[in-house]
């Protein structure tokens, strides 16, 4: 599937809205930090991340985000625990969706 500028913005908005809805459903205060779009000669990639401060909700939220993003094709999701000096610890979930040019 080739990504045009028009559908790139639609996909970006859809992912942003839907992931924020997942976070809201789980009563998490933070929203998606943003989605970056990278276009290369091989395709287009969407990169994003979210923070989850409630360790009891990480597994369920990650599974729901992963299930949602799977419909877009090839997805890589990673997570890591972060313990900053000046705020509460959180789990940082990143995702990378890659659309290859046909």
Image (cartoon, helix red, strand yellow):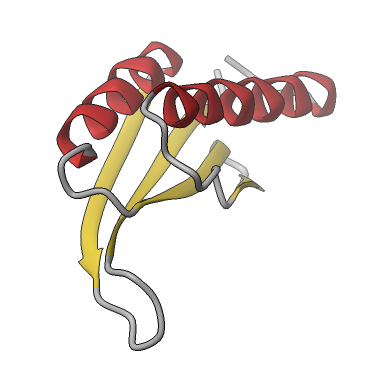
Residue 99 position, x and y percent, is 51, 27
Residue 20 position, x and y percent, is 54, 30
In this rendering, is residue 98 above or below 70? below
Q: Quadrant of the C terminus?
A: top right
Residue 56 position, x and y percent, is 15, 41
Looking at the rendered structure, the number of numbered marks drawn on it comes to 0
Q: Is residue 7 left or right of residue 18?
A: right
In this rendering, is residue 44 above or below 74? below
Residue pushed farthest bottom? 85
Given residues 23 and 70, the one toward you in this image is 23
Q: Residue at x 25, y 76 (%)?
A: 83
Q: Residue at x 62, y 24 (%)?
A: 17
Residue 36 position, x and y percent, is 63, 49
Q: Is residue 75 left or right of residue 63?
A: right
Q: Residue at x 39, y 42 (%)?
A: 95
Residue 97: quarter of image? top left
Residue 32: quarter of image? top right
Q: Is residue 20 left or right of residue 17?
A: left
In this rendering, is residue 45 above or below 17? below
Residue pushed farthest right? 6
Q: Quadrant of the N terminus?
A: top right
Q: Residue at x 77, y 28 (%)?
A: 9
Given residues 5 and 25, the one toward you in this image is 25
């Amino acid at each position: 599937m080739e990504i045009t500028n028009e559908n790139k913005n639609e996909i970006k908005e859809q992912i942003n809205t839907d992931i924020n809805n997942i976070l809201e459903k789980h009563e998490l205060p933070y929203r998606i930090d943003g989605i970056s779009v990278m276009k290369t000669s091989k395709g287009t990639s969407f990169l994003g991340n979210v923070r989850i401060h409630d360790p009891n909700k990480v597994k369920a939220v990650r599974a729901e985000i992963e299930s949602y993003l799977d419909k877009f094709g090839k997805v890589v999701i990673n997570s890591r625990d972060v313990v900053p000096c000046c705020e509460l610890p959180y789990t940082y979930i990143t995702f990378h969706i890659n659309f290859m040019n046909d």
